Amino acid sequence: MNLKQLQAFLVVAQERQITAAAKRLYMAQPPLSYQMKQLEKELGTKLFTRSSYGIELTPAGRTFLTYAQQMVKVRQAAEEALSQEKTGQMGTVHLGLISSTGELLPNQALTQLTTYYPRVNFEITEGNTMALIDQLNSGLLDLAIVRTPFNTRGLIQQVLYQDQMVAVGNHQRYSFPSARMQIKDFDHQPLILYRRFEAIFNDTFARNGITPFYSVKCDDARTAINWADKGMGIALVPRLIAQSCARSAITTVDYPAWDSQIEVVWQRDGGLSPVAKRFVNLLTSENKKPLS
């Protein structure tokens, strides 16, 4: 039994005449009659009887009709789903996401994608950059949105956002400029360190002859901001997350070497599913050549 036989059976049941059914199927009458006999032989029962009105379904034929309709519909639905997945109109994107994206996502590109293709869905895994890249390299994620610096080996990168480092803290309690900070302004200040940037900060301070005092060290920018808001020191964090979380004053750090980028990355050898490729194209459509 195959799909072609099932479709032919449905047409014969509908037309109640082999001749009319054959014409509708664009085939000769003998091959169609043979197909129906083979179907009856395979099922081990008669599906049709002849009457003065043409061909009628037997009780077994009427029972089989219901299942034949269901099988054809399931096959058509499967073909449609596979076609939509192949063209990126449906499917699941397994997306890794860092907390410090702030207001970057979800954005208009995501809204546009799910408006036109409502059968696209997202499985989001949250974590820090290193953990997400490990999962990406293990094949658990399709894409990850992460922050530089990180090991780029084996990855394709596209920049989404250029982010500045900022200082978050209480200007009344600690003495630092309200508009823009220089490296020298961090001397003799209690700093809240987001460990992600510890090596970069220490290198800069060493080259400028500054011995930093870290009053707090933590592994999440949101924790650093929260402690700064409570008056425990000056947090050094990326602007994007400071803008979404901080209640204290935000001061730009005038030191481009501390700036970072938020990038969407994926495995170089793994490729992208059509729906993931569509997602990346929408994210980067303003300043990048679309993926083909």
Image (cartoon, rainbow, N blue to C red):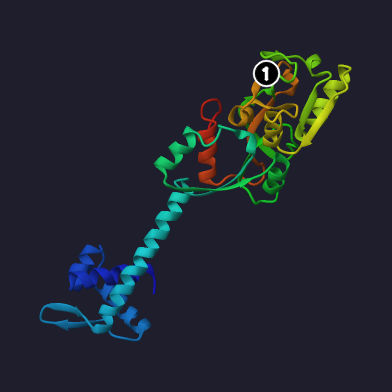
Image quadrant containing the N terminus: bottom left
Q: Which residue is found at the position 38% from the left and 59% from the top?
A: 77
Q: Quadrant of residue 199?
A: top right
Left or right of 1 in this view: 245 = right
Amino acid type, mark 1: Thr
Q: Which residue is mark 1?
A: 252
Q: Residues within 10 Å of mark 1 (few under 14, many from 20)?
A: some
The residue nearer to you, when weighing 224 against 94, is: 224
Q: Position of residue 5 (x, y in %)?
A: 34, 71
In front here: 265 or 4?
A: 265
Left or right: where does residue 184 sit relative to residue 139?
right
With respect to residue 92, does 169 lie above or below?
Answer: above
| Horizontal side of residue 1 vs 254, given as left or right | left
Image spot of residue 62 (x, y percent): 25, 78
Q: How many marks?
A: 1
- Taking the view exactly as shown, the residue that stands out farthest to the front is 173
